[in-house]
Amino acid sequence: MNKDLYSTLGIGETASQAELKKAYRKLAKKYHPDANPGDKKAEERFKEISDAYDILGTTEKREKYDQIRKGGGDFSWGDAGGQAGTSFGGGGLADILRSMFGGGGFGTGGGFDQRRTTRHTVVVSVPFATAALGGTVRANLEMPSMCPVCMGAGGSGEETCSQCGGSGRVQQGQMVMPCPGCSGAGKTYKDICSKCHGTGSVNSSETVDLNIPAGSDDGSVLRLATPSRKTIMVKLRVTPDKFFRRDGRDIHCTVKVTAPQAVLGTKLKIRTLDGKIVLKIHPGTQPGSVLRISGKGVPYRGAKGDQLIHVEVSLPVSLSEEEKVNWEKLAGLKA
C-alpha cells in the first residue's frame, strides 16, 4: 500500500501553507472522532490526516519529506525486502513517517520517544530599527503545551510495545531504526488520548516577549524552548523601512536638496537609527555624492557600521519668468 501525504490532505505539492492548513481543518472537522462516535474508519482517517499535517504543516519537515519524495522510490511497506522504494515491514504510513520525522534519534535505554524534542516553526515580523539595534518584540504564538487531558502521556492503559519489546528500536536488515509500532517510545496505549491524539501536547495561543539580538537579518532564526519539550523556531521577517536600507553593518538612505542648496550649502535634519541629527551639506555638493556618518550603522561584536547618505539634487521642471531670468544671469556669470 502506497500513500502520499499531499493526496491524504487532498492538495497539490505546490499548495501554500495557508491552503494546506485550510484543507487540514476541513478534513479534521469532517473525520473528527467526536463527530463520528464509534466509526473506526473515520478515526483511522482522522489519524492519517493529523499525521500528514504534522509533517507538511512544519516547514522543515515538509522540505525533508519533499526531498525524500522526489529523490526516487516511494514509501512502501509490507514486504520483507522491497525492491523499489523503502521497505519498513508491518507499519502503517502514519507510524513510518512519524518514526522518520518525529523521533529524537538513537539514544540509550529509553528508545526513541517521539515527544522527546520536536521543532515547530513560526514567522514573526520585526521592525527595521529593532532588528538592527536589538530590542523586544511582543508576539502571539501558537505554542505547544502539555495536553491537559492525558497530562502529556498521550493515552491511558500503558503497555510495553509488542513489536520492539520496549526497546523502541527494530532491526531491518543491517539497519536499526525507530519502531513503527510505538514511534520509538517503547510503549503503546490501549486508549489514545482524544484531545492530543497521542502526541502528548496541544497548541495554545500565548503572548511572549521575544528578545531580538542586535544585527538580526531578515530570515534570522531564534530558538525558543517550551515546557512540552518542543522547540519553537522563530523566523524573523524584517519589515522594510521607507527611508533606510541595509547593506551588512551599514545603513543607506537618500536625501534630496535643491540646486541652490547644493551650490550654497545648507543644513538638514535627517533620521538615524538613534534619532534625528543635523546634517551639514557643504557648498558645491555634487549630485550623487555620498556622505558618511561614522558609528550610525548596525552594531556588531562591539563595533558599529556607518550611515551613508546619498545626495540627490532636484532641478526645477518648469520656471517662472523671474526664475528663468535669474538662471540666465547665472549662466552669463559662468560664461
Image (cartoon, grey):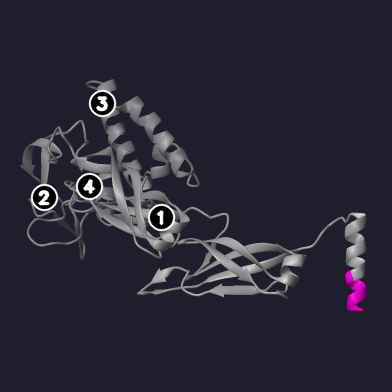
Place of residue 200 in the rendered image (x, y in percent of width and height, measured from the top left)? 18, 41
| Location of mark 3 (residue) | 33
The front one of 88 and 191 is 191
| Location of mark 1 (residue) | 236
| Location of mark 2 (residue) | 186
The front one of 213 and 143 is 213
Q: What is the magenta range?
A: 330-335
Above or below residue 298? Residue 21 is above
Q: Secondary structure at mark 2?
A: loop
Q: Nearer the viewer, mark 1 or mark 2?
A: 1
Alpha carbon separation for disc pair 2 and 3: 26 Å
Number of residues whose C-alpha sits closer than 10 Å to that of mark 3, classed few (under 14), some (14–19) or many (20 or more): many
Place of residue 317 in the rendered image (x, y in percent of width and height, measured from the top left)? 84, 57
Q: Secondary structure at mark 4?
A: loop
- Do residues under tags 1 and 4 come within 8 Å of each other at their CB atoms? no
Alpha carbon separation for disc pair 1 and 2: 37 Å
Sequence-wise first label, 4 or 3: 3
